Amino acid sequence: MKRINLVLIRPSIFFLVLIFFNLITTASAFYPITWDDLMFQMEKRMSWRRAIMETVVQVFDPFAKNVDGELSNQPVELPARGFKQIIHWKDGEVLVVETLDEKGQLLHFYYEYNNDLLSISLNENRIFETEDILPRQLRFRSRYEEERSKALQEVGIVSKNIAYHIRDDNHVFLRIGELDSGNFALLNPKTYDLFSLHRRLWQEDGGWLDLQIIFKNYKTYRWQTYPEVIEYYLDKRLFKRVTVSKIRTLSRLPAKTLKERALNLRRTQIATLKNDYAL
């Protein structure tokens, strides 16, 4: 008799465990982590404090037409519009971006040291907006909540609501921001790596274009993950690809040299001192 009871009890315990696990899984599916929880997890996963990064940027014409006057199936690259960047970064304190042409001539210089800002184009034929040259991946992966919030605000994401996002292909992400607004970010729910940024660009006729920034090919360097490739899409058509060509961490950033360069440029050029994060 006892043996029969044991046989009956064991399956019952198994099914109870399954039901309990299912309840936990269901609850977590509807109640994702909070903003504070996410910030804590991201802070733990940032190991870099200072780094220098070099990138190669390809520019495409997303709305190029073929001989029949129809949109081309493939975006057409514009080699003459490509550029390179050297990015100097100290988490939460210094961000300097040198934008260069293929010959190494300086096209744009961005300098940020705490509240001291300088954004200046040096070639009248190649004007860069500040939002076009900022390294989203570094700003968002900062260990400081203020920096991560700033990275989101730069692409119009002001809401800190977090929810699960199920894509049409059934891939699940964490979403920061409101889906209806068109401005939101998608994160890998396991690693908290940034998968994509989404922004709605309003036009004069009342319509809009959907901007997508997709972060791909994650690599690990010095215990820190980073996307090797970042692609920008307008209405799902590629118009810019950023590829990290070199990266290394530093024990010390040449902050004094970079500041002197910024001061010299400020004196000799017409500079833009405004940097509005509420875009």
Image (cartoon, rainbow, N blue to C red):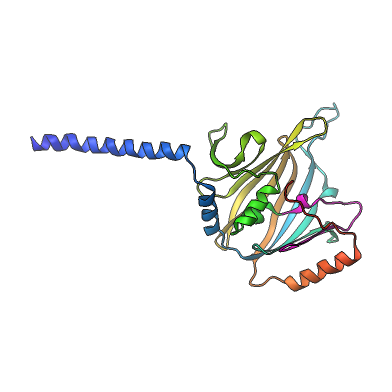
Question: Is 9 located above or below residue 35 in the figure?
Answer: above
Residue 186 image offset from top left, x and y in percent: 59, 43
> Percent from the top left, x then y, of residue 66?
83, 31
Residue 73 visible in this rendered orientation of the protein: no
Query: Can residue 160 be spotted in the picture?
Result: yes
* In-front residue for pair 37/47: 37
Quadrant occupied by the N terminus? top left
| Residue 50: image location, x then y, percent | 64, 66
In the image, is 154 to the left or to the right of 174?
Answer: right
Residue under the point 82% across and 35% down: 64
Q: On screen, 169 above or below 216?
A: above
Q: Which residues are magenta?
A: 109-134
Location of residue 152 in the rendering, given as x and y in whole percent from the top left corner: 66, 48
- 17 displayed left or right of 93: left
Question: Which image quadrant is residue 69 in?
Answer: top right
Q: Is residue 120 magenta?
A: yes
198 in the magenta segment? no
Closest to the observer, 33 or 248:
33
Between residues 211 and 118, which one lies in front from this camera angle? 118
The residue lying at 62 percent from left, 35 percent from top is: 179
- Is 154 drawn above or below residue 44 in the view shown? above
Residue 68 falls in image quadrant: top right
- Horizontal side of 251 relative to 43 (left or right) equals right
Seen in the picture, residue 276 relative to 72 is either above or below; the reply is below
How many numbered marks appear? 0
Q: Residue furthest left?
A: 1
The foreground one among 229 and 199 is 199
